[in-house]
Amino acid sequence: MKTYLRAYGEQKFLLKYLFNSESDARDLSELPIREVLYALGIRSRLVLEGFDETAMVQLLQLAVTRELSRRLPLDDVTTLDDTISLIKNAKNIVLLTGAGISTSLGIPDFRSDSGIYKKLETMGLSEPQEVFDLHVFREDPSIFYTFSREILPTVTRFSPTHAFIKLIQDNGKLLTNYTQNIDNLESYAGISTDKLVQCHGSFAFATCQNCGHKVPGQELFSDISIGVVSRCKQSAPTESDNSSSSSRKRKRKPIDGDEDEQDADESTDAAYQTQCNGVMKPDITFFGEALPKTFETRLLGQDVDDCDLLICIGTSLKVAPVSEIIRVLPGHIPQIYISRTPCTHAEFDVSLLGNCDDIVEYICNKLGEGWELKHEMITENGFNGEVVKTADRIYKFIRPSGADERQVMDVKTQGKCKNDELDEAEAKPESDAEEIIPESGS
């Protein structure tokens, strides 16, 4: 039925399956709409048993539109070897990345059993996403600040997958990296800003919700680390501020021996009045907030025409509109999926499932000269696990027993060494101390 719809279009499909050849004016109760909906993937019992026929006709129109817009896998891109060949020959690769490329660094993802949303459930919110809801933030910013320490970037290192993206760039093949991550680790990996679209923003900067003053994100880190709402310190004197300040000064008369204390109070009042004191919000994109303009202009103005390969890495593709990239790009562009778990709501040409770092390490080894992946977290002899074809177009990368535990220990050890280096630097005289760049992450 789906094949007929794609081959002959909506009109002929409806004529064939919903109307007989003698008359188009059949009674709705005679139409086999439930069977057609079932064939198009609408199989909810509530829908099939609870809707009347008129409502199901409208649902059928939506189902037909969805099916016609869904991309089908390419016949000539089906294997792991095809993937290697595509990367080697591509000239304009678009990368769509998510939290899975940073989890090996100890940064939590959002939707796994140990992810951010699971932690948020303990805060009593009806929906974990409320922490990142713009309207909730405006009503009570303390909700975000109470939890934001959990997602505050604490590392300036990048993963082997970040290094792989840098290799694509160094080989002159990176068209655009659309990242959903807010950890800003792409900057540490050396991804060029003119190749990067931070779809959901990052902690690199923050903006006052009152006066619009922008500051480097690290200026908020001390407040975030203790769960305190950060306020704007920008000087913003106004005539009304000066008037009210003068009024308060006149209301309080000096008492003998109280001149010094009064001066201090007046000084404090004046400082308060000339400070904006608005709520600071990190420049991460909240629900209810528009994506950066560069997302749409870059995607529709350049990439939709120039892209010759799409690779999605470490993303569940469940957050729109970023997830719509796979549908916006022309259907003839090959699409490769790399992640720990499969994407069940989209059909990719090839899916590579497992630890993202392992998979890109394997790919680089196969690509050969010019693709040497140099990173402290990868094995000396390359990926030594097992690659198993589990289904048509799907490959699973299986790590050797205990590899996950060893990697976690390595990350923790390297993190401890980094902290020791910071302690030593802080202990040096100022003239001898190395410059330490604060994290400006996610």
Image (cartoon, grey):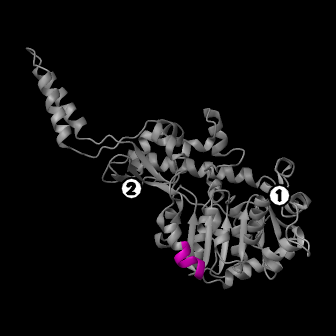
Q: Residue at x 64, y 34 (%)?
A: 122
Q: Position of residue 133 (x, y in %)?
A: 54, 45
Instruction: Judge whether 308 appears above or below 277 on screen.
Output: below
* Count of labels in the image: 2
263 vs 334, left or right, is left
Q: Amino acid at mark 1?
A: Ile
Q: Nearer the viewer, residue 123 or 292?
A: 292
Q: Is residue 304 magenta?
A: yes
Residue 42 numbered tag? 1
Span of residues in magenta: 299-305
Residue 434 numbered tag? 2
Say whether marks 2 and 1 touch (CB < 8 Å): no
SS at circle 2 = loop
Instruction: Judge whether 85 appears above or below 442 on screen.
Output: below
Q: Amino acid at mark 2?
A: Glu
Q: Position of residue 199 (x, y in %)?
A: 54, 61
Q: Main secondary structure of the magenta part?
A: helix
Q: Position of residue 186 (x, y in %)?
A: 53, 63
